[in-house]
Image: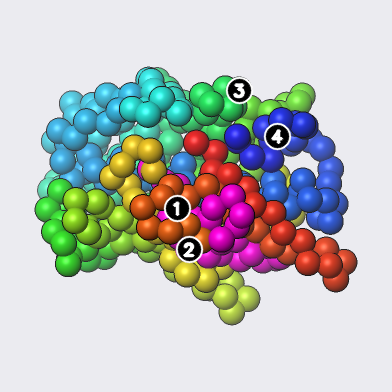
Amino acid sequence: MLLAFLSSCKKVETTRTYTVTDTTAQTTIASDEVIVNLEFDQAADDAVKVICNPKTSIAGALVDTSQLSSGIIIIDYFGKETDGTKSRTGSDSIHERVVNGHIIPWGTPEATATITFGTASSPNYEVLFLNNGNASITFEGSATLTNIYGGLLQNVVQGDSVVEHVRANVSFTYNDNASMVQFFTWNLNQVRAFSVTDTNMFASTRGDTTIAGYIIGTWGTTRLGTSFFTVTNSPIVQNISASFLDYNPLNGAKTIEGISEPISLIYGVNQEGTPFKSGTIPYGFYISWVDNTVNATDVLPYYY
């Protein structure tokens, strides 16, 4: 179930006004924090994969390396992922840093690359959630990736890692707009580390900027028109190797601040809201907040 704007009992329109004491408003804010970050993560990871190995294949996409000699790779998305839960359309372009006509390889410390969502021929990057009534989210904007430590993803071995810094300014919209399309702008400033355990690759993400004394990773405007920022209390860990778990976090915790009722999120729980055990697939994430001195909680499923 795609949360908040695709509840089976009601549809959340971006033009509707809520009070933050409304449970729907709180679940909308929390769900967006999960969905926007995870879909951005996947697009950014796709970019790193093709920078590391231009011959990498991506399900439901074509990798255009015709401008590789200029440090440019374009990913054209056209279809379903391997597990059939979603489909992506549109394009993004990846530009490696070029100095004096020479491409700075990604495996070089402090090498950078920029990602731009959309190209001249395909202006949008859209993710369609096939199990949720064909709901979709569309991205615009750009991001800069910097290799802080490590070499190429395909060369990571157990006990080693690749660490990257991610800085982005993106806008997104869902396809539930009533009368006009409205985009919401977010900033991301995060550190993302990749490591291998056995045959699985894991990604761990934490915030990397400071607002009001907090170390945060995401900030911007909610779909309710309020400003927010998100504190990473413990890194968000994902298994990005198995298609049935891709980008649904195994564990981690955040707090959404800057709103009148801050929301705590715990990732990787079962339907009762307790942390999942090894060998099982997490159901979703647990949220809690204080509503007029009363503790309120909910357990929300991941959306695929």
Q: Judge the density around disc 4: few (<14), some (14-19), many (≥20) Cα neighbours within 10 Å.
A: few
**Could you tell me how far apart the alpha carbons at marks 4 and 3 are, in whole angstroms?**
10 Å
The residue at which mark 3 appears reads as 133
Residue 103 can be seen, yes or no: yes
The residue at which mark 2 appears reads as 252
Viewer-proximal residue among 45 and 276:
276
Q: What kind of residue is marked 3? A: Gly
Q: Is residue 107 left or right of residue 78?
A: left
Residue 221 coordinates in the image, percent (x, y): 67, 52
Looking at the image, do the residues carrying marks 3 and 2 touch, with CB atoms under 8 Å apart? no
Task: Point out the tag, 4 or 3, that comes first from the N-terminus.
Answer: 4
Q: What kind of residue is marked 2? A: Gly
Residue at the spot 24% in from the left edge and 43% down from the top edge: 49
Quick one: SS at disc 1?
A: loop
Viewer-proximal residue among 254 and 16:
254
Task: Point out the tag, 3 or 2, that comes first from the N-terminus.
Answer: 3
Residues shaded magenta: 246-274
Residue at the spot 38% in from the left edge and 58% down from the top edge: 278
The residue at which mark 1 appears reads as 249
Task: Point out the tag, 4 or 1, that comes first from the N-terminus.
Answer: 4
Q: What kind of residue is marked 1? A: Pro
**Could you tell me how far apart the alpha carbons at marks 1 and 2 are, in whole angstroms?**
7 Å
Q: Is residue 85 above or below residue 201?
A: above
